[in-house]
Image (spheres, rainbow, N blue to C red):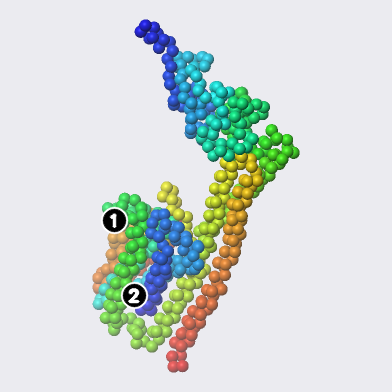
């Protein structure tokens, strides 16, 4: 019995894999695909789960159960991504873009990676690279929506609005940098507005997943108005500051007159 | 005496503007830069008060330097007025310390690096200067207390001593520099008005800006100190600051005790060479 057990142990040596280093012995190419992204930092196991591999087996599939994506048909991948991207999942839930990948069919069957996944040649349908949530993704709406559809047009308009918003915030930032070291020109309002705009932009990154364009456009406009106001006020403030000479000049003239009068008095002490 | 009166008036301007600045200044690592930015940018005429204070320090040091130079060239520092010169010279050094501690208070990059250099030069006294091992809230309160309380108080005491000593030696003073001179009051009035006019002109034309908040993790290679410290800065660059600190400065303060001979030629010659050398160091520091 003991000998049999020993034989089994010798034959199959299962090692628990809970460190990425083991994964990379075979899957270094996968690491290259996530290089530089947050998914590299999180590591393989954060998404795929720990597993056990047979260290003796060099051919075929050495995994014992391949906890996560090997059996993705049995899992809801949208919720898997949502385990970390919590706020995005919340925003996504009321929209039609939320898919339960266990039941979904047609063009939307893989959840998040339907939009965010990148098709890599020779890697099956999707590799490990995940497209960042850039506004460029809104160009791809027509992959599923008719180019003339309300969804596609609204999506592109939202993209244009946010790009203009971002452009203006960047310009305001440049202006702020230029004015920050200068005395006499209040910049705090602009700095605050830029900060608020940045927070709004970050919020939009999340809320735009709900595709409720009316609500997100309102949020954007709420933040854009004070930014424009603060930006425009800066020019007024600069003009105001330039007018300091209207007070300084008479004072300096007065001082000059004082000096001249005293000098005259000194020349003619008797008068 | 004229330049002395101008210096006194400028010192009073520093006291007045400094008190106003202290109303809003927050001596802490987090609050310092923000509060100076508030004064310089957001508060109405805050920029003017701060610019007057910053330019006032420059004019004050220029006035005292000119005062010292005139006294040196006239030779009126010699016995029995050793202590008139000594108190004036130490007063100048105290005001330099005021300029240095004041430069630190906005806690911008320049300030931070100045404090780092001061800390490393202080050697074993570093914990005393910093109030700990590194630059912390304690450092800011220490610099603020020195700048706003200790140094002005010391300066006032020295000024009182200086004026009292001048009064005592008045009869032997520079021939025309006495209050009995009928044109003295006019001369002082003109000089004071000119100094105040120049101060306002400079403060309005070139308001003191404020650099970005100090980031201890980055160091800007060429952060230069206030002009008065440029000779020292350049001497440190050559690793020869000891000559300046331990030879030139004591000689400067003790000048009347060194120059006791009948002929002034030697002292005048050496003095002019040293002045030229220090000025050259300063110019090198400014432009090299």
Count every numbered label the image shows and give the total: 2
Counting from the top left corner in percent of width and height, residue B246 is at 29, 60
Residue named by callout 1: B128
Residue under the image location 30 percent in, 75 percent down: B160
Front label number (1 vs 2): 1
Q: Residues within 10 Å of mark 1 (few under 14, many from 20)?
A: few
Q: Is residue B6 left or right of residue A43?
A: left
A36 or A268: which is nearer to us? A36
Task: State the residue at coordinates (53%, 63%).
Answer: A185
Q: Quadrant of residue B253?
A: bottom left
Q: Chain of mark 2?
A: B
Compared with residue A150, is residue A183 higher up or lower down, i.e. above or below? below
Q: Nearer the viewer, residue B126 or B43?
A: B43
Residue that lies at the very extreme toward the bottom in this rendered image: A270
Q: Are marks 1 and 2 on the same chain?
A: yes
Could one spot residue B235 in this view of the protein?
no
- Identify which residue is drawn at 46% across, 27% down: A20
Left or right, B168 with reference to A192: left
Quarter of the view holding residue B63: bottom left
SS class of the residue under badge 1? Answer: helix
In the image, residue B152 above or below residue A181: below
**B54, above or below A101, in the image:** below
Image point 57% across, 64% down: which residue? A237
Q: Tell me the residue that label 2 is attached to.
A: B71
């Amino acid at each position: 019995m003991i000998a049999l057990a020993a034989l089994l142990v010798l034959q199959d040596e299962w090692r628990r894999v809970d460190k990425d280093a083991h994964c990379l012995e075979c899957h270094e190419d996968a690491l290259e695909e996530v290089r530089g992204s947050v998914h590299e930092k999180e590591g393989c196991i954060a998404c795929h789960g720990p597993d056990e591999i047979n260290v003796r087996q060099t051919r075929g599939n050495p995994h014992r159960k391949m906890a996560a994506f090997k059996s993705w048909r049995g899992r809801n991948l949208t919720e898997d991504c949502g385990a970390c991207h919590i706020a995005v999942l919340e925003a996504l839930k009321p929209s039609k873009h939320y898919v339960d990948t266990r039941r979904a069919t047609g063009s939307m069957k893989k959840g998040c990676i339907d939009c965010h996944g990148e098709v890599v040649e020779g890697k099956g349908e999707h590799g490990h690279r995940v497209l960042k949530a850039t506004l460029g993704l809104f160009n791809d709406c027509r992959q599923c929506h008719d180019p003339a559809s309300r969804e596609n047009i609204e999506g592109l308009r939202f993209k244009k609005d946010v790009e203009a918003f971002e452009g203006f915030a960047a310009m305001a930032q440049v202006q702020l940098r230029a004015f920050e070291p200068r005395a006499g020109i209040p910049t705090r309002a602009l700095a605050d507005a830029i900060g608020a705009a940045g927070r709004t932009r970050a919020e939009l990154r999340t809320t735009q997943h709900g595709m409720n364009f009316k609500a997100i456009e309102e949020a954007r406009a709420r933040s854009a108005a004070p930014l424009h106001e603060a930006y425009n006020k800066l020019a007024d403030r600069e003009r105001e500051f330039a007018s300091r000479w209207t007070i300084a000049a008479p004072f300096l003239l007065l001082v000059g007159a004082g000096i001249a009068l005293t000098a005259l008095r000194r020349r003619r002490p008797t008068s | 005496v004229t330049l002395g009166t101008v210096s006194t008036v400028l010192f009073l301007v520093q006291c007045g503007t400094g008190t106003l600045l202290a109303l809003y200044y927050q001596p802490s690592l987090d609050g310092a830069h923000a509060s100076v930015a508030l004064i310089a940018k957001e508060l109405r005429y805050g920029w003017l008060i701060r610019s007057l204070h910053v330019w006032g320090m420059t004019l004050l040091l220029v006035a005292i330097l000119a005062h010292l130079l005139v006294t040196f060239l006239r030779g009126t520092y010699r016995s029995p007025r050793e202590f008139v010169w000594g108190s004036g010279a130490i007063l100048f050094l105290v005001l330099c310390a005021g300029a240095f501690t004041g430069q630190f208070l906005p806690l911008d990059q320049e300030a931070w690096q100045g404090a780092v250099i001061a800390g490393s030069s202080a050697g074993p006294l570093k914990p005393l200067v910093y109030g700990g091992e590194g630059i912390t809230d304690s450092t800011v309160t220490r610099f603020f207390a020195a700048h706003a309380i200790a140094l002005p108080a010391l300066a006032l005491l020295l000024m009182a001593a200086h004026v009292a000593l001048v009064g005592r030696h008045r009869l032997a003073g520079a021939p025309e520099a006495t209050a009995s001179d009928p044109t003295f009051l006019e001369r002082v009035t003109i000089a004071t008005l000119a100094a105040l006019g120049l101060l306002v002109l400079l403060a309005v034309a070139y308001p003191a800006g404020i650099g970005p908040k100090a980031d201890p993790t980055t160091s800007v290679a060429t952060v230069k100190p206030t002009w008065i410290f440029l000779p020292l800065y350049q001497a440190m660059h050559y690793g020869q600051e000891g000559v300046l600190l331990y030879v030139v400065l004591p000689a400067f303060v003790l000048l009347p005790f060194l120059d006791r001979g009948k002929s002034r030629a030697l002292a005048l010659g050496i003095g002019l060479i040293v002045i030229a050398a220090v000025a050259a160091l300063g110019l090198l520091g400014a432009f090299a």
